[in-house]
Image: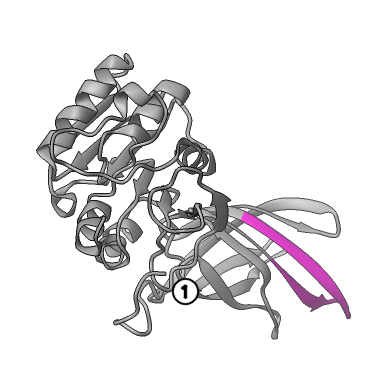
Amino acid sequence: MHHGLLRLVLICGLFAVPMLPSLAQDYGDTPYVQTPQVVVDKMLELAKVTKNDYLIDLGSGDGRMIITAAKRYGARGFGVDLNKNLVTLANRNAAKMGVAGRAVFYERDLHETDITQADVLTIYLLPEVNLMVRPRILDLKPGTRLVSHDYGFGEWPPDVELIMDAPGKPVGRDQKSKVMYWVVPSRIAGKWVWQDGNSVERFYELQIDQVFQKISGTMSFGGRSAKIEDAVLTGDNLRFTATLEMGGKPVRHEFSGKIVNNAISGEVRRGGAAEAWNATRTELREARMTDLNPGIMAR
């Protein structure tokens, strides 16, 4: 397969797999790249797909990703592809597998597809196409899961990345595939404050900087401050630690909470004791959700 044809096929993001060989046949003159079933399985496994999830596959090919999710996990969803013949094939495959009510496919431009409904988004696109759709993905509801085959999203680092054997993969020489997983993060950069539980006149202050899902910052109280540590932002769930000097000795604070707009609700543990933690954002700061070098290619 020459490079130009391969490029066209990958843009379509085709997920044809050797599961049920009778369904993985060539359809007319339309070529597509077959992805080993183990890769499809791993992508859905990383996304932790359940029957309650709605999946969207951008570049759905013969429909194997959504069909597998519907058949194996009871999920629902749809795929889009520009190739009319493959869309017809995908809907036919869904009917043969008995999941036509939960797996539907449309002839549609992925850039004109509404993806806001997705709990899980699956992608097998070229690097430059990934960068084109990335702003829309980052605007999805926090907690939306994203899985990509082979290609990343520029400087947005995956939460999980692995390289796996991909027997039967028709592109590349090493029979390997890269699978990457992200969770769309809340935008939490800014200044957050909350009252000291022992005094209504004293406040804690948390300053957060954010680059994609990576956060850093400082927490201060009573004129003393410390860098936050062990910070993890997963969707709209946040946890971090900070050690502040209180009463002449260092006290480790362990925070965990859920972000809703400009509020965080959760708990803080100090010295083994837990109490409610409710913070409010009083100053908004822009999170960096773009590459420093706008010409960077997704890796």
Question: Label 1: which residue?
Answer: 211
| Residue 190 versus residue 79 in the image, above or below | below
Position of 252 relative to 111 (above/below): below
Few, some or many residues within 10 Å of mark 1 (<14, 14–19, 20+)? some
Residue 246 highlighted magenta (yes or no) = yes
Q: In which quarter of the image is residue 207?
A: bottom right
Q: In this view, does 106 lie to the left or right of 271?
A: left
Residue 203 x/y as whole percent:
62, 72
Q: Which colour scheme is used?
A: one colour
In terms of secondary structure, where does tag 1 sit? strand
The reply, left or right, for residue 28 in relation to residue 115 is left
Q: Where is residue 98 in the image (x, y as percent from the top left)?
A: 32, 14
Residue at x-position 18% and y-position 36%: 86
Specify whether residue 7 is painted magenta: no
Residue 68 position within the rendered picture, expressed as x and y whole percent measured from the top left? 40, 28
Magenta residue span:
241-256
Residue 190 appears in the rendering: no
Q: Is residue 91 left or right of residue 199?
A: left
Does residue 62 appear in this view?
A: yes
Q: Residue at x 55, y 69 (%)?
A: 193
Q: Quadrant of the C terminus?
A: bottom left
| Viewer-closest of 265 and 159 | 159
Q: Which amino acid does label 1 sit on?
A: Val
